[in-house]
Each structure stands twice: as C-alpha cells, then as structure tokens.
Image: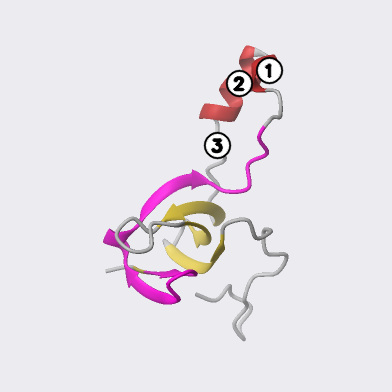
Amino acid sequence: MLLIRCPYCEEERPELEFRNAGEAHIARSANMAGESDDDFEKFFFIRSNPKGIIYERWRHMHGCARFFNAVRDTVTDKFVMTYKAGEPKPSKLPIVSNGVVAK
C-alpha cells in the first residue's frame, strides 16, 4: 500500500485516506467571465500530464480534511515530497547520492 505524508498531521498514512484534487499551482484568472471560450476550456479541462515529476493538490479526507500539495513521480507513482497549501512550488527537490530524486 502506498503511504502519503500529510504535512499538517505530520505523519504517513495509507493512500485510502486521501483524494487527488488535480494539478497544483494553476494560475486562475481574476476575470473568469471575461475569458474567451477557448481560454475557459483550457483552464477547466486541459491539464499537463507529464511523464515524470508532477505537482498536485491532495486532500486528507479521512484525517485532518485539509488540502496540501504534493510532488509525485508519475513513472514510479512515488511521492517525492508534500508541503502545505499556499506554500510556493519548491525550487529544489530532494536528491539522493546517485542523482535520482528521493522519496
């Protein structure tokens, strides 16, 4: 079973306690009503789906119920790190000695 660290509860918990809430750090328009149909569609429906590192929002549904951000590797499905909502996107990710991103 995959374990996810909640940055608020400060402990690793089983993945069944969490729900994915989509891509993190998406710039939202201050004037959504003024957006073109194409831009509106891109904002709501089009997301990046990279192979490798992705930044996501998660919610600890069966714990503190708070939203937080996570860095996850889509190839291995491993979480690199988690951090509180509202904190900036990490400029550096943890690295292990062989140059691979750490868990």
Determine the secondary structure under disc 3. loop
Labels 3, 2: front one: 2
Q: How many marks?
A: 3
Residue 85 placement: quadrant: bottom right
Disc nearer the start of the sequence (3/2): 2
The amino acid sitting under disc 1 is: Glu
**x, y percentage for residue 6?**
44, 68
Magenta segment boundaries in residue numbering: 4-28
Residue at disc 1, secondary structure: loop
Marking on residue 35: 1
Mark 3, residue position: 47
Magenta stretch contains residue 6: yes
Asked if the residue at tag 2 contacts the one at tag 1, i.e. Cβ–Cβ closer than 8 Å, the answer is yes
At horizontal 55% and vertical 76% (from top left) the residue drawn is 102
The answer to whether 85 appears left or right of 74 in the picture is: right
The location of residue 66, given as percent across then percent down, is 44, 57
How far, Cα to Cα, is label 3 from label 2? 12 Å
| Amino acid at dot 3 | Arg
Q: CA distance from mark 1 to mark 3?
A: 17 Å
- Residue 40, label in figure: 2
Instruction: Tell me the CA gap for discs 1 and 2.
Output: 6 Å
User: Contact (CB < 8 A) between labels 3 and 2?
Assistant: no
